[in-house]
Amino acid sequence: MTGYAIPSFGRPVQALWLAIRRFNGKNGFVMSSHVAMSLMMALFPFVLFTVALAGTLSQGYVTDELIDLIFGAWPKDVADPIVAELRAVLTGSGSGVITLGGLLAIYFASNGVAAVRVAMNQAYHDQDSWPFWKTRLLCLALVILGGAAILAIAAVEVVLPVYTQLVSEHTDMDVADWLSGDRLRWTFTVAVPAVTVLLAHLILPTRRHRLMQILPGVLLTLVLWSAGGWAFSIYIGKFATYSATYAGLAGAMAALIFLYLCAAMLILGAEYNGALMDLSREPEEKNP
């Protein structure tokens, strides 16, 4: 069925071993590079457009909250140079950022989603039979919905603490501490990556898979992201010398490598789900 020698351990360990072998056999690191580069080209225009639009609608009130929401889960040493460049562009930008530049940002961001979709289909062994227009419409719709969701979350981060403070002042219920700005920010920082990975498994593959089939890979990806982000942050802070190697491109290179690692972990999670599905079908094939 697989062509690989699988150690005779429990099914989760067998699936992980098979996923690693498949990841390597399908040139997973090459695909991770493609996804990372596509996301890198998509990320900055999309974030710039979203933050500029939010700043225009709110007179700059939610700009900081939005930037913290988008980059809150990134290692600080990776996010800081990107955020600094983002603020510099926003300071000197005009309305073009949210007009023609915004349309281009949405299109480039859809390319990043399309790259992830290709990787997910490959990992799940799904034949991509969709025409180009259908794939592009899906990716554009997800980008627009994602931007709207980020704007909505940023608005909630600003409005909800004010509302809870008013409730606490006029009632005996002390809800301000429970729904403080810091607590909401931490909650959304954790929830946004988790929901993003879950939707990537649910929506992007050509075939639809059941929730229980995709949860193991989602959890594996989130665990790897947490551990990998912590380890990469330590590496950047104590050992890496990107500034000596890449000079002014050090921040961009650090972000690109971080996205490359995240892409590899995402693809490995999908391969893990695919391996679990194949192993669960083996007994049925042997005992029809």
Image (cartoon, rainbow, N blue to C red):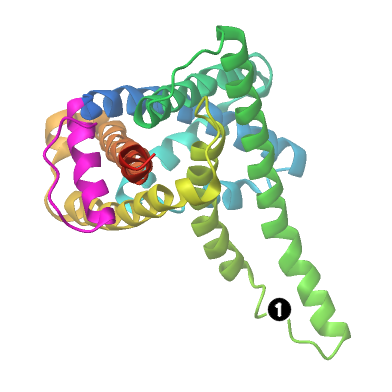
Using the rendered image of the protein, determine whether residue 71 is visible from the camera's viewpoint.
no
Magenta stretch: includes residue 6: yes
The residue range painted magenta reads 1-25
Residue that label 1 marks: 176
Q: Residue drawn 39% across and 28% down?
A: 40
Judge from the rendering whether residue 209 lies leftward or rightward of residue 14; answer left or right.
Answer: right
Q: Residue drawn 79% across and 87% down?
A: 173
Q: Position of residue 260 (x, y in %)?
A: 29, 34
Residue 18 image-quadrant placement:
top left
Closer to us: 99 or 17: 17
Specify the farthest residue to the top. 132
How many numbered callouts? 1
Q: Residue drawn 54% across and 34% down?
A: 47
Quadrant (top left, top right, bottom left, bottom right) of the C terminus: top left
* Circle 1: element type: loop
Q: Residue drawn 54% across and 48% down?
A: 211
Q: Position of residue 285 (x, y in %)?
A: 34, 37
Judge from the rendering whether residue 108 lies leftward or rightward of residue 75; answer left or right.
Answer: right
Residue 63's place in the image compared with 189, above or below, is above
Closer to us: 277 or 257: 277
Q: Position of residue 113 (x, y in %)?
A: 49, 26
Q: Main secondary structure of the magenta part?
A: helix
Quadrant (top left, top right, bottom left, bottom right) of the N terminus: top left
Q: Label 1 amino acid?
A: Ala
Residue 162's place in the image compared with 93, above or below, is below
Q: Residues within 10 Å of mark 1 (few under 14, many from 20)?
A: some
Specify the farthest residue to the right. 170
Residue 132's place in the image compared with 270, above or below, is above
Judge from the rendering whether residue 76 lies leftward or rightward of residue 240; answer left or right.
Answer: right
Magenta stretch: includes residue 233: no
Using the rendered image of the protein, determine whether residue 115 is visible from the camera's viewpoint.
yes
